[in-house]
Amino acid sequence: MRLSKSNGTNVRTISKFIFAVVLIAAAALESNAQNTVIKLVQDLSFKFTGYYQMSPTENATTFFRHAGKVSFTNKDIINLLEPEVGIIFSSDAKLKLITNIETNTQPKVIVRDRFQGEQFDTDVTQYFAAEVLESVEDTKINKNPLKASGTSYDVIAFVMRVPKASFRVLGFGAVQVKTGKHEGEPTAVVHTGTVNVSGNGDYQVSILGGILPVALTGTVKITGTDLKSMAE
């Protein structure tokens, strides 16, 4: 995707970007402190089902192959990340997607939690990462004031690499295109919605079951349109 200056609105050039396709007003950038950047913070919600091969059984006439089934969500993913980062997260911890809308880079995945009333973020991207493979928009974007609406056809992969889970899921979704605001001002074109995913890998299906090959299917829901000035 290529955008350029028009009608006094300063626009950056971005290609194959994720859920913040950047359209930044110059005033928003100039208002930033020297050590902060504008970032899109979105909620991630995972619902996965894994199918694995169980031990076969047989009788006098028939041989049976059995498929086991396991489900896991945000809570399970966060539990898998705890040993890698050395933190025991609370039951209120959340998975977030953080996109720096000023640079053409892939987003980060973080765990956001609170300790003694203070919020803290833990970057887990090296263990659980998002990768945008393609983003194709069918949108209407009003230039001044900025206002976006439409649909984007996004292809995204999520990859997890920890001792008890190693998998890659690839997803496609027709997601909504909306206007993201920074301090109340329209600042960026944002993608939000649900992506259907499938893939494969290895997963510890149970404490006794060990780590087994799994076929995965499910959804990833990505929501939120607000932009924040955050320390880089």
Image (cartoon, helix red, strand yellow):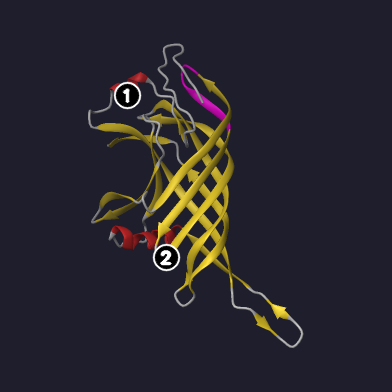
Q: Answer whether residue 175 is magenta in the image.
A: no
The residues colored magenta run 143-151
Residue at 58% from the left image edge and 44% from the top image edge: 172
Q: State left or right for residue 195 relative to residue 166.
A: right
The Cα atoms of the two marked residues, 2 and 1, are separated by 42 Å
Q: Name the residue rendered at 46%, 78% in the picture.
A: 208
In the structure shown, which secondary structural element does the residue marked by tag 1 occupy?
helix
What residue does disc 2 label?
A: 164
Q: Are marks 2 and 1 in contact (CB under 8 Å)?
A: no
Q: Is residue 28 above or below residue 50?
A: above
For label 1, the crowd category at 10 Å Cα-Cα, with few meaning under 14, some 14 to 19 and many 20 or more, is some
Q: Is residue 54 above or below residue 161?
A: below
**Relative image position of residue 106 (x, y in whole percent):** 41, 39
Q: Is residue 13 left or right of residue 82?
A: right
Q: At label 2, which amino acid type do we have? A: Lys
Ranked by sequence position, the earlier of labels 2 and 1 is 1
Local crowd at mark 2 within 10 Å, few (<14), some, or many (≥20)? some
- Is-magenta flag for residue 144? yes
Can residue 90 be seen at all in this image of the molecule? Answer: no
Q: Position of residue 32 (x, y in %)?
A: 27, 27
- Image coordinates of residue 11 in percent, x first then y, are 42, 20
Q: Residue at x 55, y 48 (%)?
A: 170
Q: Residue at x 46, y 13 (%)?
A: 6
The residue labelled by disc 1 is 29
73 sits left or right of 56 in the view:
left
